Amino acid sequence: MSKPFPPLKALDAQLLEQLQGALPGPLFEQLNGSLTADQERLRLAEYKVQLLEERLRLIRINKYGPGSERLSDAQLELLEVEPGVSVAEVAAESQREPLVVPCPAKPAARPHPGRQQLPAHLPRVERLIACTPEQCICGQCGRPTRVIGYEQSEQLDVEPAKYFVVVTKREKRACQTCEEHGVTCAPLPARIIEKGLASDRVVIDAVVRKYSDHLPLYRQSVILERETGLQISRATLDGSRHGGGRLTATHRRGDAAGIVRRLLPASR
C-alpha cells in the first residue's frame, strides 16, 4: 500500500507554524480537511484493489485445482493466456522451484591503457614556460622561490611546408686577351622537367603524394596556388609524364619510391 500524504496537522511543528503564518485561518482549515478526505479515499481505494486481487486469485485457484495454490499471481496470470492447461501441468508447475533472478554482475573495470608515447626518433623542440612574477615570490615569507624541476608534457606538432624560389646562377667566363675564344658557361644540372617552373623537389613531392598518399593532382595544384599564388598545371606536377615510358610497371604497382628513383636523372 502506498504511503498517503499526511494531513497538514500531522506535519512537523515548525513547518506547520510557517504554513499557518503564510495561509489565512479558513484557507488552512479547508486545505487540511481536503487533504484528510483525499487520504481516506486513497486508503479505501487501495483496500478495494487488494480485495479484488484476492477474489481473482481464489477464482483462478478454483479453476486450476488445489495444486495452483503454490503458484504466484504472475504464474496464475500466465496460465490464463495458455490454452488447454491440464491439471498435471499445473501440479508440475507448482512443484518447480522458483527461479532466482541473478543480480547483474558489474563489468570488470578495464585498466586504462595510458597515454600513447610519442615516437623516440622524432626530434624534440623544448619550449620553456616561466612562472608568473606572483609565483616567483613565496606567499608566506615573501622570499624569492627557486626552480626545483619542470612539469613536462609532449604534443605532436608540425611545421608547415615553406615554399621559396631557388635562383640558379651559372658562371660565365671569357678570356680578356682571347676574345675569339668566346664565352663559356657552367653546365646546367640535369632536371626531371627541363625548363619547368617546378623544381625536382616539388615534382618528387607531388609524385609521392599522388601515388603513396593518393592525393589527386588537381588538389595539389589548388594547394600550390593557395600557398604561392602560382598556377602550375597538373601535367607539370605529374613527373611521370616526363619519364619517357620508364614508369609503366612501377606506376601499376603504386611504388612511389620506385617512381622517384626512375625520375631522377642518371647523373644523381
Image: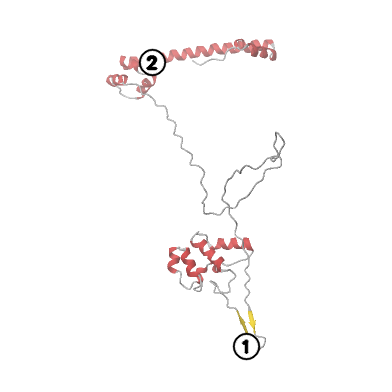
Q: Earlier in the sequence, mark 2 or mark 1?
A: 2
- Above-or-below relation of 16 to 142: above
Examine the rendered structure and indicate whether residue 205 appears above or below residue 123.
below
Q: Is mark 2 on a helix, strand or loop?
A: helix
Residue 34 as seen in the image, left or right of residue 65: right
Mark 1 lies on residue? 181
Which residue, given by chain and number where applicable, does mark 2 sit on? Answer: 57
Dot 2 crowding, Cα within 10 Å, few <14, some 14–19, many 20+: some
The image position of residue 19, as x and y in percent, is: 66, 14
Residue placed most toward the observer, 82 or 162: 162
Residue 25, horizontal then vertical, whole percent:
68, 10
The image quarter in which residue 34 lies: top right
User: What residue is drawn where x is 64% and y is 89%?
Assistant: 180
Nearest to the eye among marks 2 and 1: give it: 1
Residue placed most toward the observer, 129 or 256: 129
The three-letter amino acid code for the residue at tag 1 is His
Where residue 13 sits in the image (x, y, percent)? 63, 11
Residue 34 vertical placement versus 167 (above, below): above
Foreground of the two, 68 or 155:
155
Contact check, label 2 and label 1, Cβ < 8 Å: no
What type is the residue that disc 2 sits on? Answer: Arg
Q: Tally the marks.
A: 2
From the viewer's perspective, is 109 left or right of 170?
left
Q: Which of 266 and 45 is in front in this view?
A: 266
In the picture shown, does residue 261 fall above or below 83? below
- The residue that appears at 65% across and 12% down in the rendered structure is 14
Q: Is residue 23 left or right of residue 39?
A: right
Instruction: State the SS at label 1.
Output: helix
